[in-house]
Image (cartoon, rainbow, N blue to C red):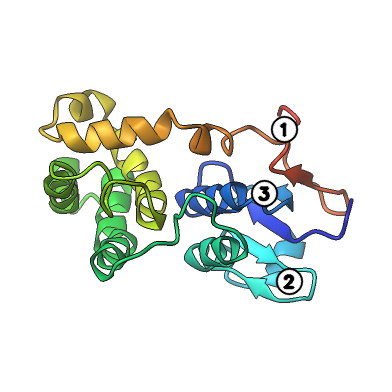
Amino acid sequence: MPDLPVLYSFRRCPYAIRARMALAVAGMAVELREVLLRDKPPAMLEVSSKGTVPVLLLPDGRVIDESLEVMDWALTQNDPEGWADTHADTETLIAYCDGPFKGWLDQYKYADRHPEQAPERYREQAEAFISTLEIRLAEQAFLGGAKPTRADVAVFPFVRQFAGVDPTWWQHAPYTEVRRWLDGWLASQAFTAVMAKYPRWQSGAPGVIFPDKPNAA
């Protein structure tokens, strides 16, 4: 294994997805260590006590354990698609996605853990953000304009989770532009390339080089 940055990741985590996508588009090879969040390896916790993914350990010992910061680090190294182009309004979208929307999304997704309200009530609260995206995407192809940027990559994994809670409802919901946008990302090479299944990392063993051909789980 060459002297590469080490990335602790969990395949389905939206924070890890956006980090992996930025690393992949930037062509930044890492040693990927796929972990289970319900059984976090001590090596990861020693690097970052937060216990969340992604965690990027650089060869010089620096640790980046915020997904947006991992994205920014990767795109600072290389940004062939121009994803780093950002605007104040799209930064606001990301902040709302990671804040209020994520809160309502979690309650909607795990409504059985939050019996104070019906699942539909949590969904309605989350829909405020989806409605904002619908208005924006009715006027332009992507959140930042005519081409994809960091904002699209940062937000769509969470919209993916929202759509997946009740797929039947989602397919009939009045968000045609958001569905178009989401479906485009889900079918994109940028997304599918980072969603390959890797075996769970075992302490003391090497990870896998990412991006590269995966070892099927």
| Mark 2 or 3, nearer chain start | 3
Q: What's the residue at 61%, 47% (across, down)?
A: 24
| Mark 1 or 2, nearer chain start | 2
Q: Amino acid at mark 2?
A: Glu
Q: Residues within 10 Å of mark 2 (few under 14, many from 20)?
A: few
The quadrant holding residue 196 is top right
User: Viewed as shown, does residue 100 lie left or right of 207?
Assistant: left
Residue 141: image tag: none
Q: What separation in Å lies between label 2 and label 3 (alpha carbons)?
A: 14 Å
The quadrant holding residue 19 is bottom right
Q: Is residue 123 above or below residue 193?
A: below
Q: Quadrant of the C terminus?
A: top right
Residue indicated by mark 3: 35
| Mark 3 or 1, nearer chain start | 3
Secondary structure at numbered mark 1: loop
Residue 46: image tag: 2
User: Does residue 134 appear in the picture of this structure?
Assistant: yes
Q: Amino acid at mark 1?
A: Pro
